Image (cartoon, rainbow, N blue to C red):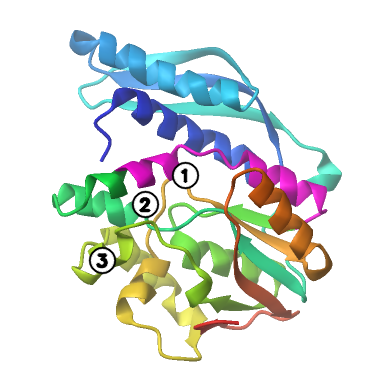
């Protein structure tokens, strides 16, 4: 969906750096991983690498080299090394009853990407999606550590539904999800209503659907959107209810949205209850 090589580099780098933030880490070192046709190496390649470097610099990390392969299909990413205190790791197995679940970005990048392929999306909506995909999860991770959150994950290929189930199972917890509280990228719901949904969403749905119980009427479009893969998605963070307001304020002060999308209701895993609102 991205024609601009600089933004392409930014999104690829953010996607890699966010894996370190998802565990409460601080990125230290990054190495470029590049596959690119040697015959086309020129200004576009330089812009891709410059875009990646801009995010490495924003993260406070150092670029220490890389590897390149002559390949007809351009590919770019990073191998990132980070540092985290072992007593303050953010894992997906620490959600406890009373925790409030927050999501730090709107959802819908996979759906907007699919709409781009079909040439059925507004340019402004594409721009917004690219902005979210190139946003680091640094603020969400730092705020989570400051309020001593114990559980978090980034929302990527398995969609919100898949990563939520992984957290519920790993934590042996009962969870409620509030669909009306989820923020969607502009144009995503409209695209989903036209059936412009990535194939990965249906694969995720087939695998995870049995772990959900719908307590109210949820339209089919929004249901499939819960399973849609995200690129460089936001963080899903479980925050103790006593610290929830502080966490929200910290993210908003950092210019990062903060959506209360669920709650941990019990200490034994069962199907996630999906409600319109909490």
* Foreground: disc 2 or disc 3: 3
Element assignment for label 3: helix
Count the marks: how many?
3
Judge by depth and name the residue closer to the eye, 207 or 143.
Answer: 143
Residue pointed to by mark 2: 109
How far from the left and from the top, in percent, is residue 164? Answer: 56, 66
Task: Please report contact status of discs 2 and 1: CB closer than 8 Å, yes or no.
Answer: yes
Q: Main secondary structure of the magenta part?
A: helix
Q: Residue at x 41, y 52 (%)?
A: 230
Q: Earlier in the sequence, mark 2 or mark 1?
A: 2
Q: Earlier in the sequence, mark 3 or mark 1?
A: 3
**In the rendering, at what x and y percent does residue 51 appear?**
42, 22
Q: Against 274, is 37 above or below?
A: above
Residue under label 3:
190
* Tag 2 and tag 3, C-beta contact below 8 Å: no
In the picture, the quarter occupied by the C terminus is bottom right
Outermost residue toward the left in this view: 119
Q: Is residue 147 magenta?
A: yes
Report the span colored magenta.
127-150
Q: Secondary structure at mark 1?
A: loop
Mark 1 lies on residue: 232
Q: Residue furthest bottom?
A: 216
Quadrant in which residue 47 is drawn: top left
Residue 33 in view in this figure = yes
Which mark is in front, 3 or 1?
3
Task: For marks 2 and 3, give the CA distance.
Answer: 13 Å
Q: Earlier in the sequence, mark 2 or mark 3?
A: 2
Q: Position of residue 267 (x, y in %)?
A: 76, 79
267 or 58: which is nearer to us?
58
Left or right position of 136 against 126: right
The residue at the point 52 percent across, 84 percent down is 275
Q: Is residue 89 magenta?
A: no
């Amino acid at each position: 969906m991205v024609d601009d090589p600089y933004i392409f580099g930014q999104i690829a780098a953010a996607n890699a750096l966010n894996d370190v933030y998802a565990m409460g880490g601080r990125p230290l070192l990054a190495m470029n991983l590049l596959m690119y046709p040697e015959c086309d190496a020129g200004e576009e390649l330089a812009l891709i690498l410059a875009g990646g470097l801009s995010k490495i610099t924003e993260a406070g990390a150092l670029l220490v080299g890389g590897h390149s392969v002559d390949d007809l299909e351009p590919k770019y990413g990073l191998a990132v090394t980070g540092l985290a205190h072992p007593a303050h790791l953010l894992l997906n197995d620490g959600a406890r009853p009373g925790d409030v679940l927050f999501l730090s970005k709107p959802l819908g990048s996979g759906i907007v990407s699919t709409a781009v392929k079909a040439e059925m999306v507004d340019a402004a909506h594409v721009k917004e999606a690219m902005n979210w995909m190139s946003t680091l999860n640094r603020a969400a991770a730092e705020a989570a550590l400051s309020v001593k959150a114990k559980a978090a994950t980034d929302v990527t290929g398995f969609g919100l539904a898949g990563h939520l189930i992984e957290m519920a199972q790993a934590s042996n917890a009962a969870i409620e999800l509030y669909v009306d509280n989820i923020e969607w990228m502009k144009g995503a719901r409209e695209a989903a209503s036209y059936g412009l949904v990535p194939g990965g969403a249906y694969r995720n749905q087939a695998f995870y659907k049995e772990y959900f119980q719908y307590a109210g009427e949820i339209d089919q479009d929004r249901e499939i959107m819960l399973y849609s893969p995200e690129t460089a998605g936001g963080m899903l963070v479980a925050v103790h209810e006593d610290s929830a307001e502080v966490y929200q304020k910290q993210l908003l002060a950092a210019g990062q949205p903060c959506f209360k999308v669920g709650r941990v209701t019990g200490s034994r895993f069962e199907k996630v209850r999906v409600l319109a609102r909490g």
